Amino acid sequence: MDIFANLAHGFSVALSFENVLFALIGALIGTAIGVLPGIGPVATISLLLPITFGQPATTAIIMLAGIYYGAQYGGSTTAILLNLPGEVSAVVTTLEGYKMARNGRAGAALATAALGSFFAGSVATLVVAASGPVLTSVALSFGPADYFSLMLLGLIIAAVLAQGSVLKSIGMVVLGVALGLVGTDVQTGQQRFTFGIPELSDGISFVALAMGMFGIAEIILNLEKPEARSVLKTKVGNLWLTKEEWRRATPSVLRGTVLGSVLGILPGGGASLASFGSFMMERKISKGRHLFGQGAIEGVAGPESANNAAAQTSFIPLLTLGIPSNAVMALMVGALIIQGIQPGPRMVEAQPDLFWGLIASMWIGNVMLLVINLPMIGMWVKLLQVPYKFLYPAILVFCCIGAYSTNNNVFDVYTTIVFAVIGYMFSKLKMEPAPLLIGFVLGPMMEEHLRRAMLLSRGDPMVFIERPISASMLAIAAVALGAMALPNLRKGKEAAMAG
Amino acid sequence: MKLNAKDIASGLFLILVALVGLYINGGLLGFGLEQHALGSARRMGPGYMPMLVFWLQIALGTVVLLIGLANGPDPLEKWTGLEIGSLVLAAIAGGVVYAAAPYFGEFFTQTYNGLGLAMLVGFLVLCWAAGWRLLGYVCAAMAFFSLTLEKGGLMVALIGTIGIAALADPDHRARPLGVLGLTIFLLALCWWIFIKELDIRVAVWPVQY
């Protein structure tokens, strides 16, 4: 089989000393920021983007990916031990996980989370490996009109699934597309919206935008909230699960893995959506559903497996179609473009090292994370005692140096300040910055495909509904939008988002 | 009335940005500044996509605004007189400093240094009101960093940045020794990561004139 040869090649790439080292660094950083409330993967990855410029593309992506799925492991630790979600995707884990800890089963909850994540991660890695080449061959038959519709679908679903009002999120997507227009027009070379500033002719710096809106604005918001970090009172206890617990957790892990893998592939999906979805499902259909609220192991096993599976399968649309499905993937697109790689269906063929190396490294990373998280749990608990007042100056300083070193230009630091202020204002107005980031990344690609499609169709917009692929994408997008107009579904979404 | 002030403000913001964009683009009913060529649907010029995007944004902003008239109440945080006053004052101070910066010396005519000084002064003035202090100190710290980095070197820039940023936290203000320890730790850490390991192109110590 071809896939095994490719995987073997992937492992030979991923097992090189440098790649193993950076997978480990990524996993360690990911676990650390997962454990620490107040800093998430989006902020961290935008913070570390400039550092990856000097690395080979494969190594850079391996490390950044490790941060994303590492955060899924780490997030559960805080949720279980302190009733504080370290990550958004671990919010539901606090519900049953902390109850288990109060019952003296903290160790079992941690072990369930880690083992479930490991199993789900391994399966999801195989899903990525199997579906990647298939989807790629489909994607190669896409014309510009199909691409445009596919991106439109991705943007709309990202907006529909974002927190808060759908209309406002779509507004944010459009605003992001508008920001993406700044810079030199690719076809005519005309400067658009640059106000004569030479630094803007390459467009608004992606790093500055992401860092300002996610890194710096988050610091200010975290400082506004009084620090609510309770001292650890629960003991971790025995890490081994009882036979009864094994029996109850196994089906939940399996269900969570399947659900997470599917929700991860969806545009707009990702780890947090998957863990919410899995929690709702376990509460409805698992055998232990009557125990929910008293520390049911199903409520930890399902969501923790689902979020890790989704963190991995959300790479599928990125690697095969070049379309980011959530804010973290938008950052990955940024990282790839800065490395000179245009994400898209040709990536599997043109960059086999990157594609297969990343997949193999995901599995290696999961093995590392299991070791990092279970035997070394005490170390991460200690990390929780570092107060935020010592963390934020470090984050700030890293942002400053990072923004500067992207182009060795202070202009990027000033841009970061501007976006920090805008990001702060957005949070006060409950405007979601994540859809904006996706729009910003997809906007320039959409414009190019739109112009190409219209040129080919001689100015006839009907091309978007005459081509079957494009038409079905648009139909799905319309259904997704229409569904949100139904009050029942909207309430369901609000309930799921509120956990 | 159930006014959702947050939604109304968001809608207004979207509309305002789009109107400015259309004005620059030249698609605002014939008025415009840069006048990007629109082209035709078949051969789109550089102004076509911006025009589509901004009109869509105006439409969305209007809908968000209209719905916001009824789906509240979700009021904005109350602004005190001091907060409004310091915001106005900060804007004026920033503007004046920006206009006057070239007269302060040749340094402020180079690479956005005038802008940096204006930002630094503006954000520090903003800190007059307690409600703006976090935003003000964090942004002022970043402005100080970019203002001093190229001539003062990384170490000077970092010391100032950490010092200003520390003002944002009341604990740090009460215990300056802790800030000193933190500064020394971060200086060493940044030197190790960025200078020794990553070797970014930046002066570490003040540049000689």
Image (cartoon, rainbow, N blue to C red):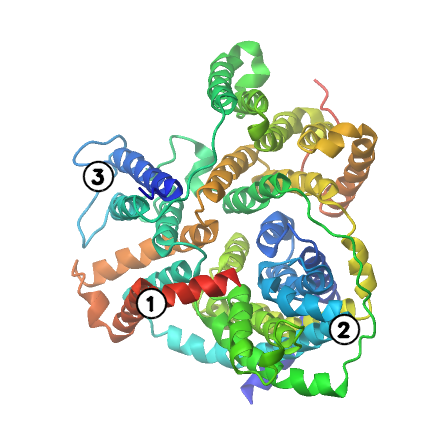
Image spot of residue A320 (x, y percent): 46, 71
Q: Is residue B79 above or below residue B15?
A: above
Discs 3 and 1 share one subunit: no
Q: Is residue A249 visible?
A: yes
Q: Quadrant of residue A18?
A: bottom right
Badge number at residue B27:
3
Q: Secondary structure at mark 1?
A: helix
Please name which of the two marks, 1 or 2, marks the residue nearer to the observer. 2
Image spot of residue A46 (x, y percent): 58, 50
User: What residue is rendered at 68% in x and 41% in y?
Assistant: A392
Discs 2 and 3 share one subunit: no
Image spot of residue A303 (x, y percent): 59, 72
Report whether B112 appears left or right of B178: left
Q: Is residue A398 above or below residue B175?
A: below
- Read off the residue under disc 2: A105
- Read off the residue under disc 1: A480
What is the distance, in whole Å, between disc 2 and disc 3 at their CAs? 64 Å
Q: Is residue A266 above or below residue A212?
A: below
Taking the view exactly as shown, the residue that stands out farthest to the bottom is A1
